Image (cartoon, helix red, strand yellow):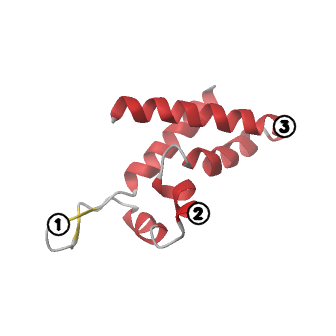
């Protein structure tokens, strides 16, 4: 559970740190520190970009796998359950802040 909380915090932190906005003249404004990651991720196909950086719920598949295998490498058979639980946790947070 502690790994899931840390993983969720990492995902939301990465998502927040990669945000940027456009002004009326289509100039990039309000850039966060990792805004270029999102800018280049938007150039990728949607099925690749969403799990990497564009969708906090979808990010649980890629980043959840990395966290799970780093912390629980002996129990890799539980990886699908962990990813589903993390995605559900991300969905609840997303609905609360929406």
Question: Which residue sits at x=30%, y=61%?
Answer: 20
Residue in front for this viewpoint, 96 or 32: 96
Q: Judge whether 21 appears above or below 58 on screen.
A: below
Task: Give the Cα separation between the discs numbered 2 and 3.
Answer: 24 Å
Residue in front for this viewpoint, 58 or 74: 58
Graded by Cα atoms within 10 Å as few (under 14), some (14 to 19) or many (20 or more), the crowding at tag 3 reads few
Q: Which mark is residue 48?
A: 2
Task: Give the Cα separation between the discs numbered 3 and 1.
Answer: 47 Å
Residue in front for this viewpoint, 85 or 10: 85
Residue pointed to by mark 3: 77
Q: Judge whether 70 appears above or below 84 on screen.
A: below
Which mark sits nearer the N-terminus, 2 or 3? Answer: 2
- Residue 33: horizontal and vertical position, in percent? 36, 60
Q: How many marks?
A: 3
Question: Which residue sits at x=34%, y=33%?
Answer: 97
Which mark sits nearer the N-terminus, 3 or 1? Answer: 1
Graded by Cα atoms within 10 Å as few (under 14), some (14 to 19) or many (20 or more), the crowding at tag 2 reads some
Q: From the viewer's perspective, is 12 left or right of 2?
A: left
Q: From the viewer's perspective, is 15 left or right of 3?
A: left
- Residue 67: horizontal and vertical position, in percent? 66, 44
Residue pointed to by mark 1: 23
Q: Judge whether 33 appears above or below 25 on screen.
A: above
Question: Which residue sits at x=58%, y=63%?
Answer: 48
Check whether the beta carbons of the residues at disc 2 and disc 1 lie within 8 A of each other: no
Location of residue 79 (image quadrant): top right
For marks 2 and 3, give the one nearer the viewer.
2
Q: Judge whether 53 appears above or below 10 on screen.
A: below
Which mark sits nearer the N-terminus, 2 or 1? Answer: 1
């Amino acid at each position: 559970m502690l790994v899931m909380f840390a993983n969720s915090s990492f995902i939301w932190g990465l998502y927040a740190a990669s945000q940027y906005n456009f002004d009326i003249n289509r100039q990039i404004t309000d850039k966060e520190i990792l805004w270029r990651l999102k800018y280049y991720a938007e150039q990728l196909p949607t099925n690749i970009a969403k799990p990497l950086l564009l969708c906090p719920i979808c990010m649980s598949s890629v980043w959840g796998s990395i966290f799970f295998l780093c912390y629980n490498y002996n129990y890799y058979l539980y990886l699908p359950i962990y990813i589903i639980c993390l995605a559900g946790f991300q969905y609840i947070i997303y609905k609360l802040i929406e």
